[in-house]
Image: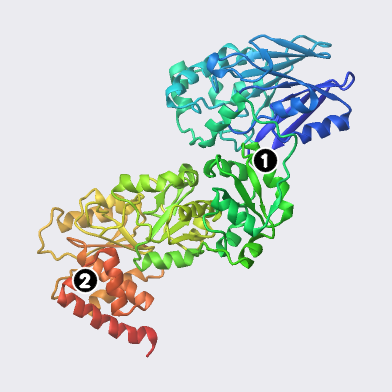
């Protein structure tokens, strides 16, 4: 037997070549669109490609069946199951459940296995010289290593019905096969066509019967709930891929070779509606790029990210690091149906700049600079564009979360649900794990008219490395539109820095939240004479019960002294760096003392302190006594800090 497995990194797509060496006839199963890998293999092995099998109408890549058939004359053997809405709309050999095709001594049998899609087929192969029993199973997107194909890609309305069909396919078809049957799936780890694919690229029926969670005995309704829970969001381009593969992709006749465009030609194409796809590294894009360009750095996930964010109905102009990138870039583009490639910028950014055309940049904001801005109280939006699972595991509190693939619509939708839109002039620091996805999202925001966008290189990894505040569920506050923290969206445990938080009137339950956010010390600024729903003794008992230190530091207009502020600063600056939470009745006293501590730590002038207090909503200037005290305190401390 001639057997070859072809793995496409990034898409995690797997195709196969199977057949006879002696007669020289082979089949290709689920081919990718750039078909030279199959043609080269067939030529090297001295065989002919006579049949092309497709397991289903693919959603994550453009099928190469028509391309390969046009070059070889092979028969396209495609599903005729699933009903009228799921029929291929071009000439092919229709296959039904039970259809068999012999290629030499090998018998290919079609098994209708709906669930991932209505028309899905699994192909088994038997070696007739040994036994008519199946030996191999090519399961497409029905069965993976450790998982099964997701049934929700056709929309919420169809998901439950397809999940039920998937259950029936598993128990009525798949599990009737012998344990020794070798399984060759259509995708590997990293594919979005399943939820939890294993890293191996083949398995057996017996192994999956024993270890695959979806194949374990359970009622159908329990299976449906299990299989629909926690599926990752499907990229929006999947629906376009389905339509293209059903109607029949255009035959390209090979990997296109777009021409180089002069800067003048690029400018003219942009005026006619083309878009620039900048495939350079985020650092290069950040330094200088063509206005309104998409930045999607060329790597193994390039095709997927293009499918997420680049309009498919506009001509694409490529900006690359160099000519060596061109072939790989084109291959990845045609795999997800981007055929309208107008060309590439000949001479790159240098040529564009030499013509005097507009250039813009994407400023890079280091994790350290981001932390300084946050601690200064600047009205900065931190936008986290990682996946839901990454976000829930750990994140910077108060960050806005929108998956990078949905940032086009998600930012304003999210902000609107939270109570208001985001001002396009407000600074937005975009964060992911490393800065790669953040650069993609930031380029989209620039296209949408946001004028102060920053990429945070190193992302959450760098943020954690410098000791930036990180929390996880439960007890991690969500983003809210910028407003005084004690407003309608009051947060009882607001963070000013990694070691200092403030609050106002608290309930007993609020201390559980304070504990969950990592505070080690609670400082109560109220005097015993103040009326409060939570008596001092009860508050102290609850704080100590939760394992935190309790400090009573009464502050009134009369007792607001330099020594009081210094004592608070001493608690915050202890060597153990344990976070300190300070509260009073309204939050204004705790806010004022906290701002004073930060001002001394950063060496701010009084005017700078008042400005940053206003940014956070602390109206220090409305109280003449408080303002005078803060100015006098800072002027005295500035002499110590500066050494003057």
Q: Between 622 and 395, which is closer to the camera in this rendering?
A: 622
Residue 414: horizontal and vertical position, in percent?
A: 36, 46
Is residue 24 left or right of 524 when viewed as pictured? right
Instruction: Work out whether residue 49 or residue 369 is closer to the camera in this orientation and state it.
Output: 49
Q: Quadrant of residue 122?
A: top right
Residue at numbered disc 1? 9
Residue at 61% over, 27% down: 245
In the image shown, does 210 or 620 lie closer to the viewer?
Answer: 620
Q: Tell me residue 191's x, y (percent).
A: 59, 35
**Residue 568, located in which quarter of the rendered image?**
bottom left
At mark 1, the secondary structure is: loop
Position of residue 273 relative to residue 359, above or below, is: above
Q: Is residue 195 visible?
A: no
Task: Name the outermost residue toward the bottom.
Answer: 644
Mark 2 surroundings: few (<14), some (14-19) or many (≥20) residues within 10 A? many
Q: Earlier in the sequence, mark 2 or mark 1?
A: 1
- Circle 1 residues within 10 Å: few <14, some 14–19, many ≥20: some
Colour logic:
rainbow
Q: Nearer the viewer, residue 98 or 462?
A: 98
Pointers 2 and 1 in contact (CB under 8 A)?
A: no
Q: Is 156 situated above or below 432?
A: above
- The answer for how far apart the CA atoms under marks 2 and 1 are is 57 Å
Quarter of the rendering occupied by the C terminus: bottom left
Residue 607 at x, y percent in the picture:
29, 78
Q: Quadrant of the N terminus?
A: top right
Relative horizontal placement of residue 484, taking residue 242 as reference (left or right): left
The residue that disc 2 covers is: 620
Which residue is located at x 52 percent, y 53 percent?
433
- Say left or right for 514 vs 588: right
For label 2, the SS is helix
Q: Which mark is residue 562?
A: none
């Amino acid at each position: 037997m001639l057997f070859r497995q072809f793995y496409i990194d990034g898409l995690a797509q797997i195709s196969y070549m199977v057949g006879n060496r002696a007669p020289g006839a082979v089949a290709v199963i689920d081919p990718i669109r750039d078909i030279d890998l199959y043609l080269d293999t067939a030529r090297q092995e001295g065989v002919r490609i006579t049949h092309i099998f497709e397991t289903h109408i693919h959603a994550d890549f453009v099928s190469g069946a028509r391309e390969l058939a046009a070059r070889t004359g092979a028969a396209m053997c495609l599903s005729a199951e699933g009903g009228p809405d799921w029929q291929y709309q071009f000439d092919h050999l229709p296959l039904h459940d039970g259809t068999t095709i012999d290629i030499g001594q090998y018998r290919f049998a079609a098994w209708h296995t709906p669930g991932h899609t209505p028309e899905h087929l699994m192909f088994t192969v038997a070696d007739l010289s040994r036994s008519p029993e199946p030996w191999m199973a090519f399961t497409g997107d029905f069965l993976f290593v450790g998982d099964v194909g997701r049934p929700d890609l056709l929309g919420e309305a169809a998901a439950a019905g397809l999940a039920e069909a998937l259950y029936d396919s598993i128990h009525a078809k798949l599990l009737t096969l012998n344990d020794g049957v070798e399984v060759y799936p259509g995708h590997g780890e990293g594919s979005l066509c399943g939820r939890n694919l294993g890293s191996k690229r083949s398995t057996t029926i017996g192994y999956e019967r024993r270890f695959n969670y979806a194949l374990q005995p359970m009622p159908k309704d329990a299976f449906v709930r299990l299989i629909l829970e926690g599926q990752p969001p499907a990229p929006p381009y999947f629906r376009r891929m389905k339509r293209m593969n059903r109607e029949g992709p255009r035959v390209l006749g090979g990997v296109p070779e777009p021409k180089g465009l002069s800067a003048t030609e690029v400018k003219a194409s942009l005026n006619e509606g083309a878009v620039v796809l900048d495939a350079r590294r985020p650092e290069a894009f950040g330094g200088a790029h063509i206005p309104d360009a998409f930045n999607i750095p060329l790597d193994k996930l390039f095709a997927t990210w293009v499918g997420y964010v680049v309009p498919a109905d506009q001509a694409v102009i490529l900006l690359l690091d160099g000519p060596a990138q061109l072939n790989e870039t084109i291959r990845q583009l045609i795999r997800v149906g981007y055929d309208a490639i107008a060309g590439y910028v000949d001479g790159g950014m240098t040529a564009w700049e030499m013509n005097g055309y507009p250039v813009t940049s994407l400023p890079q904001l280091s994790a350290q600079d981001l932390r300084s801005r946050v601690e200064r109280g600047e009205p900065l939006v931190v936008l986290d564009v990682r996946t839901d699972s990454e976000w829930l595991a750990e994140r910077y509190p108060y960050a806005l979360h929108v998956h990078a693939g949905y940032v086009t619509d998600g930012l304003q939708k999210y902000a609107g649900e939270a109570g208001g839109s985001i001002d396009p002039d407000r600074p937005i620091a975009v964060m992911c794990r490393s800065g790669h996805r953040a650069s993609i999202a930031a380029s989209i925001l620039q296209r949408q008219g946001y004028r102060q966008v920053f990429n945070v290189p190193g992302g959450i990894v760098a943020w954690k490395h410098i000791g930036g505040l990180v929390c996880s569920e439960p007890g991690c506050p969500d983003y809210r539109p910028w407003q005084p923290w004690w407003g309608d969206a009051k947060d009882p445990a607001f963070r000013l820095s990694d070691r200092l938080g403030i609050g106002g009137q608290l309930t007993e339950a609020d201390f559980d939240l304070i504990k969950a956010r990592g505070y080690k010390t609670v400082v109560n600024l109220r005097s015993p004479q103040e009326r409060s729903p939570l008596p001092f003794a009860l508050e102290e008992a609850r704080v100590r019960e939760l394992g935190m230190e309790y400090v009573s530091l009464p502050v009134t207009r009369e007792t607001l002294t330099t020594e009081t502020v210094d004592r608070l600063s001493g608690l915050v600056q202890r060597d153990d760096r344990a976070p300190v939470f300070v509260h009073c009745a309204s939050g204004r006293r705790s806010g004022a003392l906290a701002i004073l501590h930060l001002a001394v730590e950063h060496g701010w002038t009084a005017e700078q302190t008042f400005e940053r207090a206003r940014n956070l909503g602390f109206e220090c200037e409305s109280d003449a006594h408080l303002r005078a005290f803060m100015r006098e305190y800072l002027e005295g401390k500035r002499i110590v800090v500066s050494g003057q």
